[in-house]
Amino acid sequence: MSTTASDLGAPAAAPVKVPPGFFLETVLSVHHWTDRLFSFTCTRDPTFRFGAGQFAMIGLMVDGKPLVRAYSMVSPPWEEHLEFLSIKVQHGPLTSRLQHIRPGDGVLIGRKATGTLMPENLLPGGVLWLFATGTGLAPFMSLIRDPETYDRFDRIVLVHTVRQANELAYRGLISEELFGHELLGELVREKLTYVPSVTREAFHTSARITTMIETGSLTADLGLPPLSPERDRAMLCGSEAMNADVRALLEARGFVEGSNSEPGSYVVEKAFVTK
Ligand code: A2P
């Protein structure tokens, strides 16, 4: 009697044809933070290069075609694997599928990384403010684990605002592991401040980033002088509304947007995936 694939409980898998411009990587682990938020790690092609703060197109083959969205790398450039943070949207074309990935599954990673949240797009300055809401934290997770970020700034303040405390992804990693990290710990202890804030349930800090800037509590609570384009630099990554509102507050204080061609006092990128 011959054995067929269906006898083995699974249809014979057709070999996946990798579309041009992508690597096919293997999922290594998946972590579900909440019913709205998950992260995963996957293998990394040794030729895939990126800078901390950049993003790539990530996704799955659906009906024989790549279905991809922009995702910032959470993992630092020196790490062997890649890590991504994503929302889950029940009827979202990509995230409704991506949220079900498991170790061993294939995932598409675009070969070209890009983005504006890079320290070289900022003029030299004293304090680097990293303002994130929700999954906008992702690129900053890479930046705060890249020693180069610490070379460029005297101090780095990461402000992460979410609705509920369980959405403070990587909170333990940032506030504990990183401070005790074998190689980065000293830099982190000397220069990094983590300011988590939660807006829709009781928490020690409960203000939106915009409110903290407007009232001045952002700087005052850390014993720092008011935000100034002479000394401070900012990176923004969150919803369109948050980016627009923080941008307006910074520009009112004289901050100028930087880019690859001309560094400035702040840079902005949206937390891309909303579906
Ligand atoms: P809030 O709870 O007051 O709306 P979301 O999940 O909607 O992207 O929100 C993530 C976090 O960003 C929430 O804490 C939310 O605060 C905050 N937020 C939303 N819009 C803005 C904005 N325009 N400026 C500053 N913070 C914002």
Image (cartoon, rainbow, N blue to C red):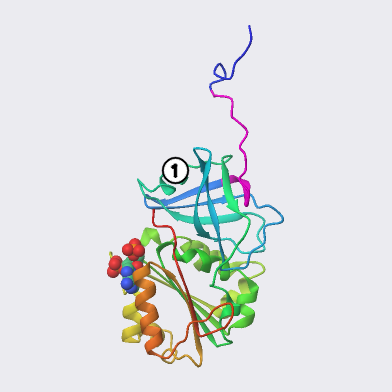
In percent of width and height, residue 173 lies at 52, 62
- In the image, which residues are magenta? 10-28
In percent of width and height, residue 124 lies at 59, 87
**In the image, the residue with mark 1 has its CB under 8 Å from the nearest atom of ligand 1:** no
Residue placed under numbered mark 1 in the picture: 97
Residue at x-position 50% and y-position 93%: 230
Q: In this view, does 1 lie to the left or right of 171?
A: right
Q: For ligand 1, give the image quadrant.
A: bottom left
In percent of width and height, residue 16 lies at 61, 37
Look at the numbered disc 1 and give the secondary structure of its residue: helix
* Residue 172 can be seen in this image: yes
* Quarter assignment of residue 162: bottom left
* Quarter assignment of residue 87: bottom left
Residue at x-position 67% and y-position 61%: 49
Closest to the observer: 231 or 176? 231
Closest to the observer: 112 or 161? 112
Q: In which quarter of the image is the N terminus?
A: top right
* Residue 199 can be seen in this image: no
Count of numbered tags: 1
Residue at x-position 39% and y-position 73%: 243
Q: Which residue lies furthest to the top in this view?
A: 1
> Is residue 138 magenta-colored?
no
Q: Is the magenta stretch mostly helix, strand or loop?
A: loop
Is 259 situated above or below 28?
below
Closest to the observer: 194 or 56? 56
Is 149 situated above or below 217?
above
Residue at x-position 47% and y-position 90%: 229
> Please, what is the three-letter code of the amino acid marked with disc 1?
Arg
Within 10 Å of the Cα at label 1, are there few (<14), some (14-19), or many (20+) other Cα atoms? Answer: some
* Quarter assignment of residue 110: bottom right
